[in-house]
Image (cartoon, rainbow, N blue to C red):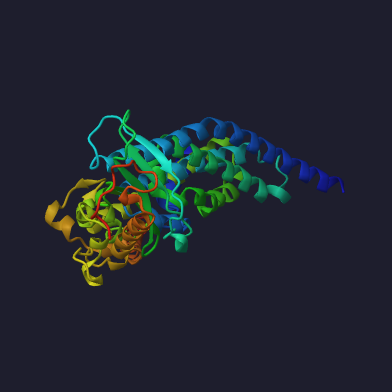
């Protein structure tokens, strides 16, 4: 009985010391990590939004869009749209959203900037864990995503699926994941009326064309 | 046992990868580039040194019946520390090493050295052993990563070595999982030849 008590005490002591040490370091590093994550996101948004407007300061606001379908339910993600504007003007300069597509070995996240007419203005792969040397090359814009720029949803389709974008050699699954996820996101936004001047967009933004 | 001997032990004679065949999982997984290999090696070496130091320091205080849980807590604590610090200050490296940082906890080299060396030797010797093992592990990873990165992407430490033409059409298998096994086989073969020569010369 006494021995069990002693063993338990030693274990407890070791665990308590470990917990205190971890608590202290976590207290120091957690804010830095959070700041970095936020900074990264801001930087990424600024980068993709470069194709949208040329301004030193941009404002990003999350939008709540009523009745928008979520095309990413199959990968347990949600379509979130951010409105881009150039202060002090509050009119819409464009939108940013993250597309989630199931690739060969990961769910690829693509940040997309799209102008108020529904034309893609910039993209950036935020996350992927595809095969190094093959699918992972998707992070190089010239391999695939550069082709999205200047296109609207119905033009973003691989050649194999009836469009005219070339897939990366040997990586159809990765290419298709990115292409289809971006296309679906754009379609959902179009259906919710974002590109026609309804919803949160300013009046006078009603334009035809872009996405059917 | 002299300190110097403990130190060099892990580098060649008992190299964790080539001789003890411990820690193969992270070894095969992160050696796709020399940068990753160095980062992983540094992280594992740090944890190894800290855990060997503490285990050796506490070797007379920890009852042998609960020593393994104590070692695990000690190792897991240091790994979590590395994980948090790396995430805060080296986010790029942290992202590319990904899941393999938390998995240092179950890297058998570390528990193996705590159990097989540090709990029976004085503090200085244990630290020397940890440094040697860490260098041995890092060295082995850098060797394999050099071949994989050169063949698989035509670069070394992200510097283009083999030229643009090669980088556009590299020997892809080298950075895929099978390439790691194939190259490891060759390296182990060469290592064994060297070992035989050395033994024969004695």
From the viewer's perspective, is B116 left or right of B24? right
Residue located 36% across and 42% down the image: A83
**Viewer can see residue A131:** no
Extreme residue in the top direction? A88
Percent of width and height locating residue A33: 47, 36
Q: How many marks?
A: 0
Percent of width and height locating residue B117: 57, 47
Q: Name the image quarter holding the C terminus of chain B.
A: bottom left
Residue located 60% across and 50% down the image: B115
Percent of width and height locating residue B57: 62, 36
Residue located 56% across and 31% down the image: A27
From the viewer's perspective, is A124 left or right of B56? left
Percent of width and height locating residue A60: 37, 37
Which of A8/A122 is in front? A122
Q: Quadrant of residue A21?
A: top right
Extreme residue in the right direction? A1
């Amino acid at each position: 009985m006494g021995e069990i008590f002693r063993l338990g005490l030693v274990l407890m002591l070791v665990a308590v010391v470990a917990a205190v040490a971890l608590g202290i370091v976590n207290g120091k590093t957690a804010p830095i990590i959070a700041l970095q994550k936020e900074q990264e996101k801001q930087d990424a948004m600024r980068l993709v939004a470069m194709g949208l407007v040329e301004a030193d300061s941009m404002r990003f606001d999350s939008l709540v869009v009523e009745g928008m379908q979520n095309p990413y339910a199959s990968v347990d993600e949600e379509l979130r749209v951010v409105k881009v504007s150039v202060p002090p003007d509050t009119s819409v300069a464009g939108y940013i959203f993250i597309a989630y597509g199931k690739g060969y070995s990961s769910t690829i996240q693509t940040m997309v900037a799209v102008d108020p007419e529904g034309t893609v203005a910039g993209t950036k792969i935020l996350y992927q864990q595809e095969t190094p040397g093959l699918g992972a090359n998707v992070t190089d814009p010239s391999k695939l995503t550069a082709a999205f720029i200047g296109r609207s949803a119905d033009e973003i389709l691989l050649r194999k699926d009836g469009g005219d974008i070339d897939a990366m050699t040997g990586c159809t699954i990765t290419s298709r994941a990115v292409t289809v996820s971006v296309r679906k996101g754009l379609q959902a936004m179009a259906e919710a009326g974002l590109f026609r001047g309804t919803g949160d967009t300013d009046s006078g933004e009603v334009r035809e064309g872009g996405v059917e | 046992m002299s300190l110097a001997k403990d130190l060099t032990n892990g580098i060649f004679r008992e190299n964790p990868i080539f001789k003890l065949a411990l820690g193969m999982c992270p070894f095969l997984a992160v050696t796709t580039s020399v940068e990753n290999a160095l980062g992983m090696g540094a992280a594992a070496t740090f944890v190894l040194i800290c855990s060997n130091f503490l285990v050796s320091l506490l070797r007379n205080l920890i009852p042998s019946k609960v020593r393994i849980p104590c070692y695990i807590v000690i190792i897991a604590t240091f790994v979590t520390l590395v994980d948090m610090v790396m995430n805060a200050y080296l986010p790029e490296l942290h992202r590319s090493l990904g899941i393999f940082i938390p998995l240092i906890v179950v890297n058998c080299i570390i528990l193996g050295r705590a159990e097989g060396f540090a709990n029976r030797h004085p503090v200085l010797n244990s630290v020397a052993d940890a440094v040697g093992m860490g260098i041995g592990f890092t060295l082995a990873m850098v060797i394999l990563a050099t071949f994989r990165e050169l063949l698989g992407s035509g670069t070394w430490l992200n510097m283009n070595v083999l030229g643009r033409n090669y980088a556009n059409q590299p020997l892809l298998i080298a950075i895929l999982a099978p390439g790691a096994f194939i190259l490891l086989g060759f390296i182990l073969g060469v290592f064994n030849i060297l070992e035989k020569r050395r033994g024969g010369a004695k």
